[in-house]
Amino acid sequence: MLQYDTSAFHFFLLSLLSFYLIPSWFSILTRLHSAFIGTKDKDIGAIARTSDEKKKVAELKRTYKGFKTLGQGFWINFLITSVITLLFIYLIVSVKTDGEVNSFDPFHILDVDPNADMKTIKKAYRTQSLKWHPDKNPNNPAVEAKFMMIAKAYESLTDPTAKENYEKYGNPDGKQSLEVSIGLPAWLLDTENRNLVLMVYLIVMVGVIPFSVWRYYSNSSKFGEKDVMYDSYAWYHHTLSEHTLIKNLPETLAGSAEFRKRNMPTSGTEREEISGLMNKLRSQMLKPKYNHPVCVKGNVLLHAHLCRQTDGLSQKLKEDSRYMLENSGSLIEAMISVCKGQESLKTALNCIIFGQNITQALWVKDNELLQIPHFKNEEVKYAVNGKKSVKGLADYIAVPDEEKKGIVNFTEEQRKDVANCCKIIPNLSVETNIFVDDDEDHQVYAGDLCTIRVTLTRNNLDEGETAGFVHAPHFPFPRREAWWVALGTKDGKIISIEKITDPERVIEHDIKFLAPGQGTYEFVLHVMSNAYIGLDQKQTVDLVTLDESALPQYKVHPDDAELDDEPTLFEEMLNANVEEDSDSEDDSDDEDEKEEAIKELSADEKKKLELQKRRKAAAGDDSDDDSSVEEVYAEK
């Protein structure tokens, strides 16, 4: 009967624990390396290109470097891994001292030198046996095992047969047979532990495992595309429509399911602070449609950021505002995807503009020149008025540095900041081309798979240079430059809307769709930045489609036509089966004819048979159908 083996269980447990410890320590060391050594400043946008970005850079380094980046989950995993590592070391020591891996060494057991004489060995044996005698240590299984090992060690050094077996096989008892046991601890079979083992088994199998599976499923089932919760998608479907304005979007974003737990006010002081902030920002806000505390708080915090009035917030509200801004990118993309499903181009474009406002911390009435470092309303007023005035950001960055207005009273460092910022802000040119793949006459016919190729060129970059992080000193997180390309109809229906994140200098983006019926069509192409206000471009794309009947008739090549007449593999197999069946039927018909030949035919049957043979000969038909014969014979 198989027995439980504690030593074998130790080996099994060591193997099992290694499956967790190895990847866990690798993850821990990787996180530590990333937090202190591996993360470079340029990878997280922690390089101050202007003096306005110095505060943001310092905050980014605190956020993405050091112990603060590790998070609570890291420390929980580190604690669990450390405890399991100590258990792993204990098991290794146990296996090394008590397990089968510890080879039998009589000299080590008796604590004598390998070159000791017989007198020394006998003296050591007496000393050790007296020390470890079971009578001196009653009810101690470890002492009994040690005493037996001492006796076996002495025997292997004094008895010739035992000594020969030890030298030959490593064991005084001779060659050992293979023993099979169960790799579980022997104490599981103790009657005293029976109730405890059963209780632990029930807790793990009935409680822990089902709860873990339920917890994982319940959490994972809440999230959809882009790790956005399904409740947020439902909220966007409810609140977004073709009539949604940009001023409505902060309240829509504030109601996202991701913020509902965190943005619930928990104290009277917090409610009073939110109420006071709302009174301060009321002129910049639309009248709220929803009075739920979560929506109100999120709406107020977003307006505080958009109006650049977050410095006076308490630490708790600052952390809540940072949390909302951190998740704003993926949530706004989810809002755009909902607009795409509703085919509402205007609302989708409003969502893109709202993302620009979030990034630059500017609201609808603010001038886009406030994106330039050190610019305030006074500098903006001077730049947009008078001679050589500019209309917007795109015009301002095109002006030579020495001719830029609004920087007369700036210091030399501030002037450099303005020049550097104008180099960072992209100068984009857009080109379009309409074609059909494998086209011969360069015309578009109704029903063709039409392609509009949009070519974006960043003129502010040199050859081989790529776009980096946007200049957004008031947005507390790094954001890479990207562009939205949207194609729609004149009546506001979306044909395609996609985000292009390629940082190369020249980008080609293809929009494919089926060409409509014969006629002339005008589409609207929008190319919009994900971060900068005032750089959006709008173009019209004209498409002329011809009647598909004007296409030359397709002629099938004779070889291709012959291929259509050839049977397929399935048809060949089917015909083979039919032939086998017909052969078997023919055999049965022959047997029937032989049996009929034995019988004597009547006069009528003879006439019928002769008429059948004549008809077969005349028509050349091998069919056995007698219906026509019967009809002719009946007429006769």
Image (cartoon, rainbow, N blue to C red):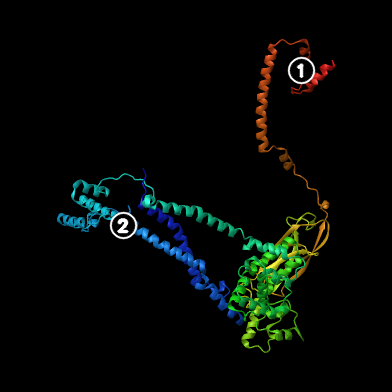
Task: Tell me if mark 1 has few (under 14), some (14-19) or many (20+) residues whose alpha carbon lies within 10 angstroms of its own.
Answer: few
Image x and y of residue 605, in percent: 76, 13
Q: Residue furthest left?
A: 119
Residue that label 1 marks: 613
Of labels 1 and 2, the one closer to you: 2
Q: Nearer the viewer, residue 17 or 216?
A: 216
The amino acid at mark 2 is Thr
The amino acid marked with disc number 1 is Lys
Residue nearest the viewer, comparing 548 with 328: 328
Q: Position of residue 426 (x, y in %)?
A: 67, 74
| Mark before the other along the chain sequence, 1 or 2 | 2
Side of 33 where 480 appears, left or right: right
Residue at the image position 62 percent from the left and 79 percent from the top? 313
Q: Quadrant of residue 417?
A: bottom right
Specify the label residue 97 is tagged with: 2
User: Tags 1 and 2 in contact by the CB under 8 Å rule?
Assistant: no
Locate residue 308: give its quadrant: bottom right
Q: Residue 582: x percent and y percent?
A: 68, 26
